[in-house]
Amino acid sequence: MPIVLLIIVGAAAGFVATRLMDLHTDVPTTIAIGVAGALIGGLLLRFLLMLTGLAFGFVGALLGAVAVIWIWQRYSGRS
C-alpha cells in the first residue's frame, strides 16, 4: 500500500510542481518527476511526516519534485 500512496502523492506533487515551475511535460514524465520528488522529499522530511501527518508528506513531495525539476533544467539544458 505505501507504494500506491507514493505514486498517487507523487503524481499530484509532480503535477503541481510542473505547473509552479512552468514546465510542460507529458504525463509519464510528470509522474516520474513527482515520484522522484516524493522519494527525495520523503527522505528529507521523514521526521516531520511522523510528527505531523500526511500534509507534510505532500509538502515534502512537492519540494522534492521542484528540486528535481530545477536540477533537470539546470544540467540538461532544457527550459
Image (cartoon, helix red, strand yellow):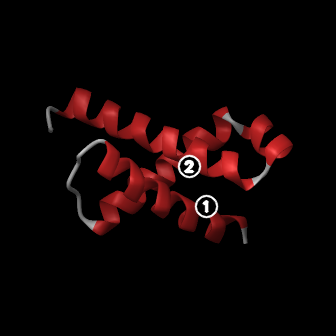
Give the image location of residue 10, x and y in percent.
52, 58
The disc label shown at residue 62, or none: none
Sort mark 1 into few (<14), some (14-19) or many (20+) by Cα contacts within 10 Å.
many
Tell whether 13 sits left or right of 45. Answer: left
Give the image location of residue 53, x and y in percent.
78, 51
Figure check: 26 above or below 71: below
Residue occupied by mark 2: 38
Q: Secondary structure at mark 1?
A: helix
Give the image location of residue 8, x and y in percent.
55, 68
Query: Looking at the image, how many numbered discs can be counted on the residues?
Result: 2
Q: Nearer the viewer, residue 29 or 58?
A: 58
Tell whether 39 sits left or right of 31. Answer: right
Q: Secondary structure at mark 2?
A: helix
Sort mark 2 into few (<14), some (14-19) or many (20+) by Cα contacts within 10 Å.
many
Callout 1, which amino acid?
Leu
Of the 4 image quadrants, the one containing the C terminus is top left
Callout 2, which amino acid?
Ala
Give the CA distance from mark 2 to mark 1. Answer: 7 Å
Residue situated furthest top in the rendering:
74
Quarter of the view holding residue 51: top right
Q: Residue at (72%, 55%) from the top-left corner?
A: 54
Of the 4 image quadrants, the one containing the N terminus is bottom right
Residue occupied by mark 1: 6
Q: Residue at (33%, 31%) from the top-left corner?
A: 71
Q: Residue at (57%, 61%) from the top-left corner?
A: 9
Q: Are marks 2 and 1 in contact (CB under 8 Å)?
A: yes
Figure check: 48 above or below 4: above
Q: Residue at (65%, 32%) from the top-left corner?
A: 44
Residue situated furthest right in the rendering:
51
